[in-house]
Image (cartoon, rainbow, N blue to C red):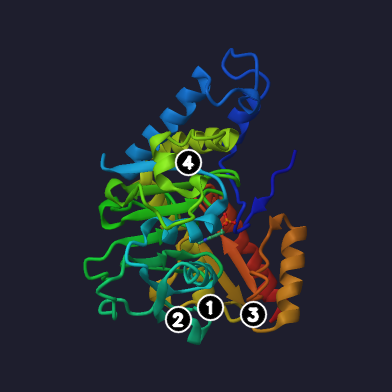
Amino acid sequence: MARVYNFSAGPAVLPEEVLKEAAEEMLDYRGTGMSVMEMSHRSKAFDTIIKEAEQDLRELMNIPDNYKVLFLQGGASQQFAAIPMNLMKNKVADYIITGQWSKKAFQEAKKYGNVKAIASSEDKTYSYIPDCSDLDIDDDADYVYICENNTIYGTKFKELPNTKGKTLVADVSSCFLSEPVDVTKYGVIYGGVQKNVGPAGVVIVIIREDLITDTPLEGTPTMLTYKTQADADSLYNTPPCYGIYICGKVFKWIKKMGGLEAMKAHNEKKAKILYDFLDQSELFKGTVVEKDRSLMNVPFVTGDADLDAKFVAEAKAAGFENLKGHRTVGGMRASIYNAMPIEGVEKLVEFMKDFEAKNK
Ligand SMILES: *Cc1c(COP(=O)(O)O)cnc(C)c1O
């Protein structure tokens, strides 16, 4: 068995310990005589799995009691519609556009109301986070929307926007559980788990209870109504059971590692190794404004598309997988999520140094 260093942006690397445990429990989950894939979502065993997962997540993120935690399907992209459908009372929302994911969310929301882009970094290929300290926020805005960590471009909001009292909604797909977070600053925090938390198929929505309405926009499907899901504790229909089970194991792994403070230290250490190298390299260059750099996704280029392709191919042959940049931006991107060991980043930098020496 040979595990590679997997720098995929998502689905992405998971802790080896979690995968091993899941493998051990594959045929007989704790004396039930069946796999978690095979059991009823109404069974006692699964009830314990989902309740423990929620409890562990609440502890990790310090989620207050007036927030619901929902384990849903449809990925982050489904929430692009669910959010306006459930949160629009005035049918007004303001979006901050820092990349493709917020742009997609913005375009989807436009179907449901009067939606404005109040800031954008599109002018410089989303290589920075715009100043959000004094934006022109609509008095009637039902919410202000951000994508907190921009997976494709490698930027992160280090400071949340000043929403002037309006509800903040954040897509945290690619920075979920990567560092401590003050949940009380948000109305909704949500993310697809396949970047940093678990296997594709689960999206977690953390929502303040007063935002859960009986009266979403007319025509909102039952399944997309947060109230349906909240009232049923995410068991309105069959949830993504196996995915939730793996997420639960990842939560326990993070707790064992010391929680989100420890994750942050671990992630800062890894990112520093890579950014420090990029900053002094004569061949490779980071593409993001320094103060807005993500701890999770690190895009870089050589400035020569052919050399980029050569690097990606040689890196792959050396056991560093998925370093090709997003198809819309080219270059390279190393995603260094929670489960990427420090050693993986150290070895990548060694490989880059070697490549640089040979290709200068
Ligand atoms: C990957 C990603 C998405 C899309 O997730 P899906 O689950 O595939 O819909 C949305 N937002 C961010 C920030 C992402 O990284």
**Mark 1 CB in 8 Å range of ligand 1?**
no
> Which mark is drawn over residue 71?
4
Residue position for label 2: 121
The mark closer to the camera, 4 or 1, is 4
Mark 1 crowd level (few <14, some 14–19, many ≥20, 10 Å Cα): many
Residue position for label 1: 287
Mark 2 crowd level (few <14, some 14–19, many ≥20, 10 Å Cα): some
Label 1 to label 3: alpha-carbon separation: 10 Å
**Where in the figure is residue 74, as x and y percent of width and height?**
57, 50
Residue flagged by tag 1: what amino acid is it?
A: Thr
Residue position for label 3: 302
**Mark 2 CB in 8 Å range of ligand 1?**
no
Label 1 to label 2: alpha-carbon separation: 14 Å
User: Does residue 171 appear in the picture of this structure?
Assistant: no
Task: Say which label, 2 or 4, has the lower sequence index.
Answer: 4
Residue flagged by tag 4: what amino acid is it?
A: Phe
Label 2 to label 3: alpha-carbon separation: 23 Å
Q: What element carries label 1?
A: loop
The mark closer to the camera, 3 or 4, is 4
The answer to whether mark 4 and mark 1 are in CB contact below 8 A is: no
The mark closer to the camera, 2 or 3, is 2
**Where in the figure is residue 197, as x and y percent of width and height?**
51, 46
Quadrant assignment, res 145: bottom left
Left or right: 82 as drawn, with respect to 94: right
